[in-house]
Image (cartoon, rainbow, N blue to C red):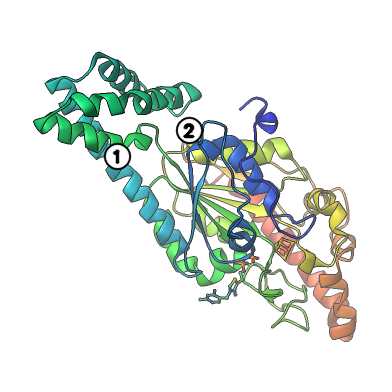
Amino acid sequence: MKGAQFRQPLFEFSGACAGCGETPYIKLVTQLYGERMMVANATGCSSIYGGTFPTSPYCQRPDGRGPTWGNSLFEDNAEYGFGMRLAADSNRVLLEAKVKRLLELGTTPELTEALNASLALWKDTSEEAIAAQNQVAKVIDDAVEGASGEALELVKKIRELKDYFVDKSIWIIGGDGWAYDIGFGGVDHVIASGRNVNILVLDTEVYSNTGGQASKATPIGSVAKFAEAGKPLGKKNMGLMCMSYGYVYVASISLGANRNHAQKALMEAEAYDGPSIVFCYAPCINHGIDMRYSQVQMKKAVESGYWPLYRYNPASEEGKRFSFDAREPKSDYIEFIKSERRYTSLYNTNPENAEDLFKKSAEDAKRRWNIFKNIGELM
Ligand SMILES: Cc1ncc(C[n+]2csc(CCOP(=O)(O)OP(=O)(O)O)c2C)c(N)n1
Ligand code: SF4
């Protein structure tokens, strides 16, 4: 989408820590899809800064359109978003049937025209389709006034469902603690359903909101709560697990490293008529960095081979579905991790094994990087 960065963000002024790596991803998604976006938000930082009632960082456009947002439990958020998908689909099926029947019976010329315009754009999600939907809303009250019998019931139902002429963009959002660990069963179930949902994993590599406990996304050697001596085991390769289905859109992005790539992946994920999952690298105060430079750290993470960039798009033709989008590392991995206190604190908590763990961390990252580099041939 050209000029997306100039569109009004429908996520503003959150109470997240300054420099938080999570919020820019959410802001970008609202710039792209905010006017028809439904969010299922897992408990975690994003539900706290996203739902600071009575205020909310989510906002509306001048025409009143903006994201709808709900927070479910930590453990069932994917299912919560899946329910939103099913509800939107079922409302649209019902709406289409009622509109067709009303057009058979006849209604006011203004509503007939507006309904026909909206039906012609049924699969469209553009501003034109939203304008056609708005036009139905504008003229429907008059049609209710003059209707009776079956037509009255139909027109009332259409009024109730008038926000569903344009399909919803369903976003299931949460952190790595949710997606990799506690909500994983649900995430797995929902991506295996084949339904059109978009999952955004804000990967801070720890449970951020509760103070930085290790998750399965925490890499080897990183110090976190419950891993004070450095995490001894590697980061779960969840992107690979998701790709193994073959019908799930999967991407790994880092906004500070490559904004165009991040936006492209989010747009491909949304456009894919099936389940999508996007892993977003998100620096956090728990990393022990200068948060003024969190976007720079995102760049360095990719340049040092710490965080891969890739996209797997099942909608592309066979043989061209996977693309590895990061260049060969041009800086040193160990130097990169030593720029973060979550790694250097190993010198205090486990000094005799620190260097060994750093080496293991570099080897593990390289192994995972190579898996992605070479997997294209198989996918
Ligand atoms: C079943 C369950 N276990 C634990 C918690 C407590 N809890 C709330 S938020 C959170 C951390 C969330 O971490 P993550 O999903 O990584 O998101 P982040 O805060 O990093 O954005 C935890 C452990 C909970 N709400 N429910
Ligand atoms: S703790 Fe981390 S993820 Fe949470 S708001 Fe602060 S910087 Fe963002």
What SS does tag 2 mark? loop
Q: Nearer the viewer, residue 133 or 203?
A: 133
| Spatial CA span between label 1 and label 2 | 41 Å
Image quadrant of ligand 1? bottom right
Q: Nearer the viewer, residue 211 or 364?
A: 211
- Mark 2 neighbour class, 10 Å CA radius: few under 14, some 14 to 19, many 20 or more: few
- Quadrant containing the N terminus is top right
Residue 253 makes an appearance in the image: no
Contact, mark 1 vs mark 2 (Cβ under 8 Å) = no
Q: Which residue is mark 1?
A: 160
Q: What residue is shown at x 16% (from left), y 19% (from top)? A: 106
As shown in the figure, which amino acid type bears the numbered disc 2? Glu
Q: Is residue 38 left or right of residue 312?
A: left
Q: Position of residue 62 (x, y in %)?
A: 57, 32
Work out whether 127 lies above or below 42. above
As shown in the figure, which amino acid type bears the numbered disc 1? Glu
Marks 1 and 2, the one that precedes in the sequence? 1
Q: Which residue is mark 2?
A: 317
